Image (tube, helix red, strand yellow):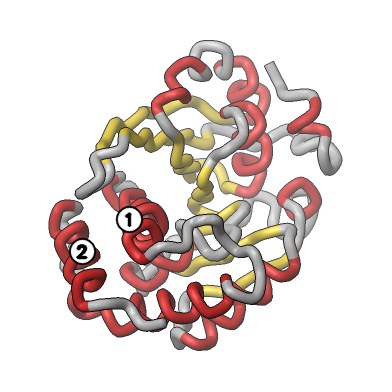
Amino acid sequence: MRMSPEGAELLLGAGRELGLDLEPHMPRFARFYRMLVEANQRMNLTSVRDERGIILKHFVDSLTCLLYPGFVSGMEVVDVGTGAGFPGLPLAIVRPDLRFCLLDATRKKVRFVASAVEGLSLRNAEALWGRAEELAQGVKRETFHVAVARAVSSLPVVAELTLPLVRVGGFVLLQKGPEVEGELGHSKGALEKLGGVLEEVLSLSLPVGGEARRLVVLRKRRPTPKEYPRRVGVPAKNPLS
């Protein structure tokens, strides 16, 4: 299924609201849209299936990460729990000057992301199957400038899965909803244990739809102690405090 002219204009208009000129990237977004819709008919990649929802809740929502001005050309970025490629793939399309590692623990999703990277001819992205807890205790520990994530879990849990992957001086950018405001007060201890601090929380509204969003920025101030992250599943079952 192809993106409709109305869908294309919706994406272009939302991009303009974010200060982005998406016109040069529309062929890739259109191709990605078709790949996602076709694959979603065979496997459950995303519960969002309508064109407007995919454009706004996946493509545009991913691009709101660029409202934070900390991304610098040449940075290595890991998208933790990328799922069907969000926010990493839209970011990789718009920012070819950044290098993206799209990480997920579900094989079928990683296979789709890998096929999308190839189908979109993205030379600045790679798909990686694995668990953040294991990779952060191995070859990927403190190797990235940035970690991004659509953070469904609580702030202490996501911080333990992301901060150990980021080098000192780098940052973590978490996409959250307004509910994160209630998590901030009891997350300070967890962040200190992991070598990070809360740098800022950006409040924004999703273009067109107006849904409230928060971008939570964590800064890596010192190396994460070797005991973190804990083994697979422990961060979620027993969050740091």
Examine the rendered structure and indicate whether residue 158 appears above or below residue 150.
Answer: above
| Secondary structure under the numbered disc 1 in the rendered image | helix
Q: Amino acid at mark 1?
A: Leu
The residue drawn where x is 57% and y is 38% is: 152
Q: Residues within 10 Å of mark 1 (few under 14, many from 20)?
A: many
Q: Quadrant of the C terminus?
A: top right
Q: Amino acid at mark 2?
A: Leu
Please give the label number shown on residue 150. none
Point out residue 99 in the picture as x, y percentages from the top left corner: 47, 69
| Secondary structure under the numbered disc 2 in the rendered image | helix
Point out residue 26 in the picture as x, y percentages from the top left corner: 26, 78
Q: Earlier in the sequence, mark 2 or mark 1?
A: 2
Point out residue 20 in the picture as x, y percentages from the top left corner: 19, 62
The residue drawn where x is 71% and y is 22% is: 240
Q: Quadrant of the N terminus?
A: bottom left
Does residue 18 show up?
yes
Please give the label number shown on residue 10. 2
The residue drawn where x is 62% and y is 53% is: 81
91 vs 66, left or right, is: right
User: As rendered, which of 6 and 112 lies closer to the eye?
Assistant: 6
72 vs 139, left or right, is: left
**Quarter where residue 103 is shown:** bottom right
Contact (Cβ within 8 Å) of mark 2 with mark 1? yes
Point out residue 227 in the picture as x, y percentages from the top left corner: 81, 33
* Residue assigned mark 1: 56
Examine the rendered structure and indicate whether residue 104 appears above or below residue 169.
Answer: below
Does residue 71 show up?
no
224 vs 177, left or right, is: right
User: As rendered, which of 62 and 1 lies closer to the eye?
Assistant: 1
